[in-house]
Amino acid sequence: MGNRGVIHNDKKEIVRPFKLKAWIACRLSFKERSRVVMTPQRWTELFFLDEATAFAAGHRPCAECRRGAFNNFKLYWIQANPAYGFTIKTPIRLVDEVLHTERMDALQQKKCFNENLSHLPDGSFVQWNGNAYLVKRAALHLWTPFGYTEKLQLPANTVLSALTPKSVVNAYRAGYQPQVQELPVSN
């Protein structure tokens, strides 16, 4: 489940893409807390198929309900993105600032970058022929809201539009392994 702050109105309509620069991915249940979806004046729940999908949307692990994943992600992210000069003591809000510059342009449109398929680690998302695909074991797996379906093999030198922010892709290369919903057996 994701959180970008309060992005809905009292009629439960999404009215903005985000309110905060900290876009987090949370557990569906934590400490027996219970919420009503889209409670007025409370953060808006966003639901994702898996962690790889949430990361492609620009989210990162929550520091409260996903502390282990948060610590690992921050460590790998810092190791993989040395140009920022961050250390493990760097406040996460500075990482959030970087992620924010990578996820949307000035018109609040999704930012992407081009990358050779052979350079994309497992868990990355790409766009091909207008559809979102997960990269796993050098193949593309079509994303749907209900799971991954068809498997597509492209030449390794194919240049694709990467949907996952570049610094997150770097963290994957450094060793962070996002949770991915199980792929169909035939894939």
Image (cartoon, rainbow, N blue to C red):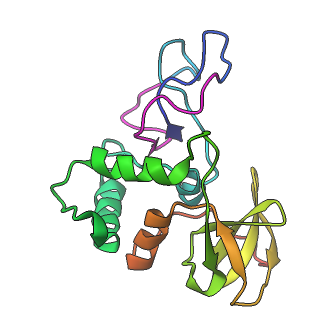
Q: Residue furthest left?
A: 89
Q: Quadrant of the C terminus?
A: bottom right
Res 66 seen here: no
Residue 129 left/right relative to 100: right
Residue 69 left/right relative to 145: left
Res 77 seen here: yes
In the image, what residue occupies the spot 59% across and 20% down?
Answer: 8
In the image, what residue occupies the spot 56% across and 84% down?
Answer: 119
In the image, what residue occupies the spot 54% across and 78% down?
Answer: 121
Nearest the viewer among 95 and 38 is: 95
Majority secondary structure in the magenta region? loop
Residue 132 placement (x, y as % from top left) = 74, 61
Nearest the viewer among 95 and 173 is: 95
Inspect the magenta stretch and tell me whether residue 25 lies in it: yes
Count the marks: how many? 0
Q: Residue furthest front?
A: 106
Residue 14 left/right relative to 151: left
Residue 71 left/right relative to 125: left
Q: Is residue 124 above or below residue 66?
A: below
Q: Is residue 126 above or below residue 91?
A: below
Q: Is residue 45 above or below residue 115?
A: above
Q: Quadrant of residue 75?
A: bottom left
Residue 122 placement (x, y as % from top left) = 56, 76
Inspect the magenta stretch and tell me whether residue 48 lies in it: no
Residue 70 placement (x, y as % from top left) = 33, 54
Q: Which residues are magenta?
A: 15-34
